[in-house]
Image (cartoon, rainbow, N blue to C red):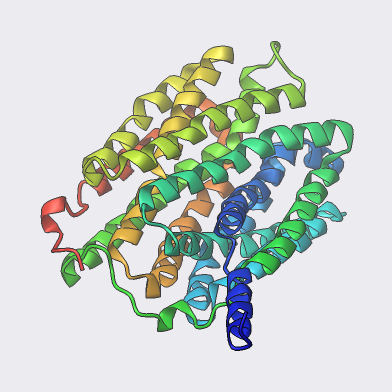
């Protein structure tokens, strides 16, 4: 080997060593989605045990204190999206992993309702980082947005499934504080691995050269973003209320049949796990069918399912919940696909942050109302109210641009 060739080869080896391990990085970004949803639902899954420990006679009276987490989950998305585009997405994801761990430890150590509320608010604040940052990071490396978002949605919903079973078992054997502590350790470990494998960004996304995949006129783009935000706000109420209330709903409707919290958690986990695969299927089908009618189909199917669930008991309720969560989870990828389709990556985090800030901020009211509504009206009437939200979402979606409104690809 010549002296001149040796440094070149050494440099090539160094460059190869610095190539980002895409599979590991993609796995971590998907795992982060699961962590995001898992942490947000620990309180709802453990609320009965926490209420008893804090001296509340009913879980419904403690549930509204979790509202602050979902309020910050929405409102925090706005500054997080801006920081992601203008400062850097890697830095924001590191804050996500370590911040979630610290906030969950705070909840695990809470001795009063005020301390728990502060801890939950911090969880919601750090959780707001993921959607406007993690999903655009995944799409940077993706050639098939629908499939990427579908797989990412599966990971997020498996986090929802895991919290149902993990929290039940941890409460049964270690107490509700461990339900916060164990996931906190997982998040910190993932943060350490992410720091190691994710390459530093040479420049923030806002300074890169890019362009939208499909162009709309300025007027149609504004209309599309407004419709997406309004539809997301309505559908987010259904998503947040159902995932926060299902544990208590299934406990009520299985009274006298199954009352062990770990067994009920396992049943709910099965529902979430099976229905989570709907996002993978939808993600692969999105590129084959027109977006607007496909999205409408997933939303309209929720309406009769909610009506049947309002009347069902026992195993019939479980079947209705399975169908309902298939349609709820199946509708989730559409908004992110629309953003990836119409919005330039250089400002994608900011657009996603604004959309999430408005929709999730408004939908947090549904989490606040869950306890009082169930206490005064019962789950049956609560589910019928949710059916009205699905009807509202379907009406809003009729205003989405059609394929004929799209200009030639950029």
In the image, residue 213 lies at what x, y percent?
27, 64
The residue that appears at 59% across and 39% down in the rendered structure is 158
- Residue 311, placed above or below residue 209: above
Quadrant location of residue 260?
top right
In the image, residue 157 lies at what x, y percent?
55, 41
In this orientation, which residue lies closer to the viewer: 4 or 307?
Answer: 4
- Residue 54, placed above or below residue 32: above
Farthest left residue?
A: 404
The residue that appears at 32% across and 44% down in the rendered structure is 393
The residue that appears at 51% across and 35% down in the rendered structure is 276
In the image, residue 410 lies at what x, y percent?
21, 69
- Residue 238, placed above or below residue 65: above
In this orientation, which residue lies closer to the viewer: 120 or 383?
Answer: 120
- Residue 227, placed above or below residue 345: above
Q: Is residue 171 left or right of residue 313?
A: right
Farthest front residue?
A: 1
Quadrant location of residue 405?
bottom left
């Amino acid at each position: 080997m010549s002296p001149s060739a040796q440094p070149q080869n050494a440099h090539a080896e160094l460059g190869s060593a610095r190539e980002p391990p895409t599979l590991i990085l993609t796995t971590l970004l998907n795992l982060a989605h699961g962590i995001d949803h898992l942490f947000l639902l620990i309180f709802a899954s453990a609320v009965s045990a926490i209420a008893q420990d804090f001296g509340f006679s009913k879980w419904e009276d403690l549930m509204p204190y979790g509202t602050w987490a979902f309020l910050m989950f929405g409102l925090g998305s706005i500054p997080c999206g801006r920081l992601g585009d203008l400062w850097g997405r890697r830095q924001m994801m590191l804050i996500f992993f370590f911040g979630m761990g610290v906030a969950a430890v705070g909840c695990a150590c809470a001795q009063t309702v005020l301390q728990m509320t502060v801890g939950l608010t911090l969880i919601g604040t750090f959780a707001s980082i993921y959607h406007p940052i993690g999903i655009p990071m995944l799409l940077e490396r993706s050639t098939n947005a629908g499939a990427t978002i579908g797989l990412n949605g599966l990971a997020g919903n498996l986090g929802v499934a895991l919290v149902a079973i993990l929290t039940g078992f941890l409460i049964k054997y270690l107490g509700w504080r461990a339900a916060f502590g164990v996931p906190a350790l997982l998040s910190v470990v993932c943060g350490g691995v992410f720091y190691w494998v994710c390459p530093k960004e040479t420049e923030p996304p806002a300074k890169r050269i890019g362009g939208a995949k499909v162009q709309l006129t300025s007027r149609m783009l504004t209309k599309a973003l407004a419709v997406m935000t309004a539809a997301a706000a309505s559908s987010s109420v259904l998503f947040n209320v159902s995932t926060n209330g299902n544990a208590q709903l299934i406990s009520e409707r299985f009274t006298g049949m199954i009352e062990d919290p770990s067994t009920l958690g396992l049943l709910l986990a099965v529902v979430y796990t099976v229905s989570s695969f709907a996002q993978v299927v939808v993600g692969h089908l999105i590129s084959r069918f027109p977006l607007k009618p496909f999205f409408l189909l997933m939303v309209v199917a929720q309406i009769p399912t909610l009506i049947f669930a309002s009347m069902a008991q026992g195993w019939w309720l479980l079947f209705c919940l399975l169908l309902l969560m298939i349609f709820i989870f199946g509708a989730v990828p559409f908004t992110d696909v629309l953003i990836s389709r119409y919005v330039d990556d250089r400002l994608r985090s900011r657009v996603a942050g604004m959309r999430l800030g408005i929709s999730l901020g408004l939908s947090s009211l549904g989490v606040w109302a869950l306890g009082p509504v169930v206490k005064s009206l019962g789950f049956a009437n609560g589910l019928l109210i949710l059916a009205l939200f699905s009807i509202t979402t379907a009406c809003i979606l009729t205003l989405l641009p059609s394929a004929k409104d799209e200009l030639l690809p950029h």
